[in-house]
Image (tube, rainbow, N blue to C red):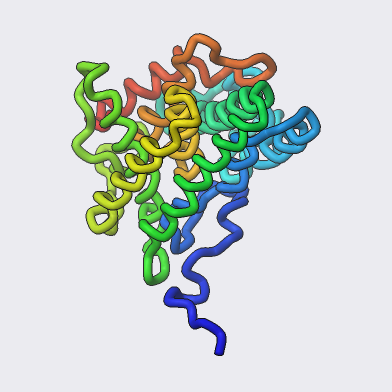
Amino acid sequence: MPEVSPHPLNWHNKACESAKQANCKCYCRGAGHQNDLLKRASTCPDPTEYAKLENDLREIFGSFHRNEQDVTTRTRSARRVPDLEEIPHLRFTVGKGATWFETLLVDEALHTAFLLLARASLRLNDTTREAQGRYVKSVTESAIDIVRSQGPSTGSVDAHVWCGIVSEYLASMEETETSTPHPENFADIRYPRKTRGRTPAALKEVRAQGMRHLADNFETHEQVPRPRRVELLRLVGAATCPDLWSHSAAVRFCLEPFVLAEEWPPKNTTRIAVPPGFDQLRLRWSRKKNW
């Protein structure tokens, strides 16, 4: 007699592991989102595979825009692109213009972070590259069992459970390195100019186990140098977030550290997702007491 699965038949939709939209609403609460891209970036072995990954990322995120007024370059399909005639009249600090600018920042930063770590993988020997792959696989696939739901998703906010946990864990690692206060709620979901947010209802029940899972994996995969483990975990948090535009903690602890690094931006990538733009993003969330 075949073994009966203890989970609902659709408890995790495998399609979300290669999702091309920023709206994962699977039972995995975000933990499985874009895992295919994470594995490929962390284990990219040669120029041929890099070119394939680069092409797929372009298909998902669009191409890199010349500036915030460039609406002719293809954009991530989930985003609302202003009309060409609107651009000269848009203010990028309020309303539609602000949303356009803010979403460009986070989408291009994540796109670039994938390429950055894939290029780093190309320079590794096979042993180190394989160790990176094991680390990413262990962190992501096991997390699905920890944070998954037993019923249908309650919406897009529920899909921020996992990236909220990753953000909090990364923040805990830098507590001794910064005097900047950390947020009280690492899964407060609202866009940069919104006053009130929402929190995934399921976060409390899985938070502690998720934090232990991250700590255990970080400590046991010492074959991967510590700085690279941190970078990979940041990419995990940013890539599995259903929409970084609405999650300040994921931007602050997972995405912004890439942007602030000395080697950023890598050649032939973003011109927009650079520190001055992220300063604006940080300020907008800070004004609403959500940074």
Q: Is residue 102 visible?
A: no
Q: Answer with left or right where residue 95 lies relative to residue 115.
A: left
Vertical placement of residue 210 versus 124, above or below: below
Q: Residue at x 51, y 82 (%)?
A: 3
**Residue 162, visible in the rendered structure:** yes
Q: Is residue 99 left or right of residue 286?
A: right
Seen in the picture, residue 280 relative to 30 is either above or below; the reply is above
Residue occupying the far top of the picture? 262
Where the C terminus falls, by quadrant?
top left
Residue sitting farthest toward the right: 48
Tell me if 110 is positioned left or right of 159 in this view: right
* Count of marks, rendered view: 0
Q: Residue at x 63, y 34 (%)?
A: 83
Q: Which quarter of the rendered picture does the N terminus lie within?
A: bottom right
Front residue of this view, candidates 225 and 59? 225
The percent position of residue 121, horizontal first and vertical second, equals 63, 27
Residue 223 on image: x %, y %: 49, 31
The residue at the point 29 percent across, 46 percent down is 212
Figure check: 200 above or below 125: below
Residue at the image point whose x is 24% and y is 58% from the top: 205
Task: Find residue 215 and report its horizontal and vertical position in percent.
Answer: 33, 40
Residue 289, percent across and down? 22, 30
Residue 127, located in which quarter of the rendered image?
top right
